[in-house]
Image: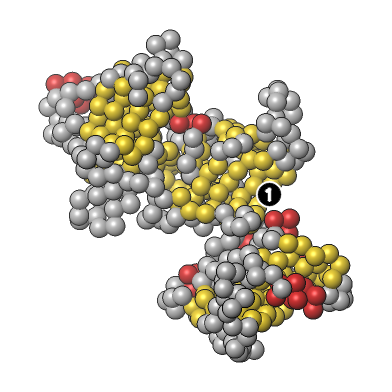
Amino acid sequence: MLLLRAALALGLLAGAQAQPFDYPSATSPTTWANTDASLPHHVAYADGSLARAALLRLNPAGYGPSYAFGFFCTNNPRPAAPCADFLLAVAVVYCNSGGLMTSVVAGVPQVVWSANRARPVAEGAAAELTPAGGLVLRDPNGAVVWSAAGTRAVAGITLGADGNLALLDAANRTVWQSFDHPTDALLVGQSLRQGARLAANASADDWSPSRLYLAVAADGLDAYVDARPPQRYYRLGFAETAGAYATYANGSLTVSGAPAAAAPLATIQLPAVGAGTVQYMRLEYDGHLRLYEWRSPAGWAPVFDVLRAFPDDCAFPTVCGAYGVCTDDTQCSCPDAASFRPVDFRRPNRGCVPRAPAASCSSASSGPAQRLLPFPGLAYFNDHATSLRTLDRVSDAACGKACLGDCACVAAQFIYGADARDGFCYLQSEVLSLETSRPEVLHYNSTMYLKVQATTTRAPARTRF
C-alpha cells in the first residue's frame, strides 16, 4: 500500500495524474470540461459506462463505496461504442485504497442525483462554477442546459460525506444543495419535503422522468401515476399535519412534522446500513421503491422493497402495461382476444391495445358509437379516492351508463358485495395495468367495464401470451 501511495503521489500510475486521494471541494471560479484531458480521474467500465470525477469524497475508511460529482454515462446501449449521453451528477463509485475508482465489473457508478436527466450532454460539455452564476451546465455549443444558484454569491462547492452537493457562500453557508432537489433517489439523511417529488426514470435506458412519482402530502406519503387526475397506487396515511416530510434515516423511512422532536407520524422499518458500506433508495420505472446496498465483492444488490402495494405486486400500475391483466403469479394477458391485441407478443408486460379504441373526448360527439365491455373478476389499482368520479350505492347498469355518458371516462370499476344492484362505481380517465380480483382478500367483487367502439366484438376468454 505504501508503494501504491508513493506511485500516486509521483503521478507514475498509468492513466492517473498527481492528485490528492480525496478532493471533495472546489473554489469559485472553476470550470470542468467533459473530457478525459480536463478530468484525468476517469474510468471506463465493463458495461460501457464512463465516469469522469470532478469532486471525490472518499469513504472514511480510505476505500470502498464513495461519492463523486462529475460527468457520468451509465446507460450506453452499445458498450463497444463511445459514450454519447452524459449526466452532470452525483454518483456512488467504488474506490481502492489509493483513491482511484475501480471495480470496473461490479462497481458501475450508481447515479443518485443529476442536474440534466431529461437533457443529457455530449463530450465537450462543461460545468462552470462562478460567484455570480453559481453552477451552470453548458452543452458543447455553449448553450445553458441547467443552472443552480442561491441568493448570495457562490464562493465554492463541496460534496459532503452524505452525498449532498452544496454551493457555499464566503461565510461557508449553504446557498443551494442537491438534497433539496431530489431526482429519483434518496440517500441516508435526505428528506423528501412537500413540493418535491421522486420521479422514476422512463425506462432502464432512458433517464428522463416518467409519470410515476412519490410525494409527501399533509396527510400521506403517496405514489402516483401522473394522469388526469393523478392515479394513486400507494398510500401511507397519517393525521393531517402542515409541513409533514419524510426522512430516509439509517434503518427507517420516517414521516415527521414540526417540531421534529415530536413523535413520528408514520414509519417504515428498513434494513440498517452495514458497516463500511452505502445504501440508497430509488423509485424505479416499474413503480417500486427499492433499497440498494453495496455488498463486497459482489457489488450492488437490492435488499428491500419499500412500497408494498395491496394486495400484491399486481397492484403496481405498469406491471403488465396498459390494458394488460396481471394474475396473482404476475403473469400478463390481454382482457380478451377479440377486442384487444398485445403490443408485443414476445414481451407480455408491454401491455395491450383495443382493436377498436374509443373515440377521444374531443371527437366523441362526431365519432362512432361506443359501448362498454364487462369483465367480471377484474379490478384496478387506482385508489378509489383518486378516481375520475365516484358513484355510491348504484347498480352495475347505472355505473356503465355513467361512464358512457362521460367522454372523459374510458373505464369503470364496479365493486359490490352480494348484490350487483347495490355497489360503488369508480370512473377512470385512463387504463393502465389491470389485475384479477381476489374477493377472499379484498372482501368484495369487482367488474371492470372497458370502453370501445360499438362495432367491437369480443371472445369469452382472455388470451395468455
The foreground one among 323 and 22 is 323
- Under mark 1, the amino acid is Arg
- In this rendering, position of residue 216 left or right of residue 17: right
- In this rendering, the answer to whether 72 lies above or below 208 is above
Identify the residue at horizontal 46%, vertical 27% (top origin). 177
Picture coordinates of residue 397, whole percent (x, y): 79, 78
Residue 97 position by quadrant: top left
Q: Can residue 61 be seen in this view?
A: no
Pointer 1: residues within 10 angstroms few (<14), some, or many (20+)?
A: many
The residue beneath circle 1 is 235
For the N terminus, the image quarter is top left
Furthest residue to the top? 171
Identify the residue at horizontal 44%, vertical 55% (top origin). 202
The foreground one among 48 and 389 is 389
The foreground one among 437 and 103 is 437
Furthest residue to the front? 366
Picture coordinates of residue 51, whole percent (x, y): 28, 40
- In this rendering, the answer to whether 113 lies above or below 20 is below
Q: Is residue 114 visible?
A: yes
Identify the residue at horizontal 58%, vertical 57% (top origin). 227
The foreground one among 228 and 10 is 228
- In this rendering, position of residue 27 left or right of residue 292: left
Picture coordinates of residue 263, whole percent (x, y): 74, 29
SS at circle 1 = strand
Model colouring: secondary structure
- In this rendering, the answer to whether 391 lies above or below 364 is above
Picture coordinates of residue 11, whole percent (x, y): 14, 25
Residue 256 position by quadrant: top right
- In this rendering, position of residue 217 left or right of residue 9: right
Identify the residue at horizontal 20%, vertical 56% (top origin). 80
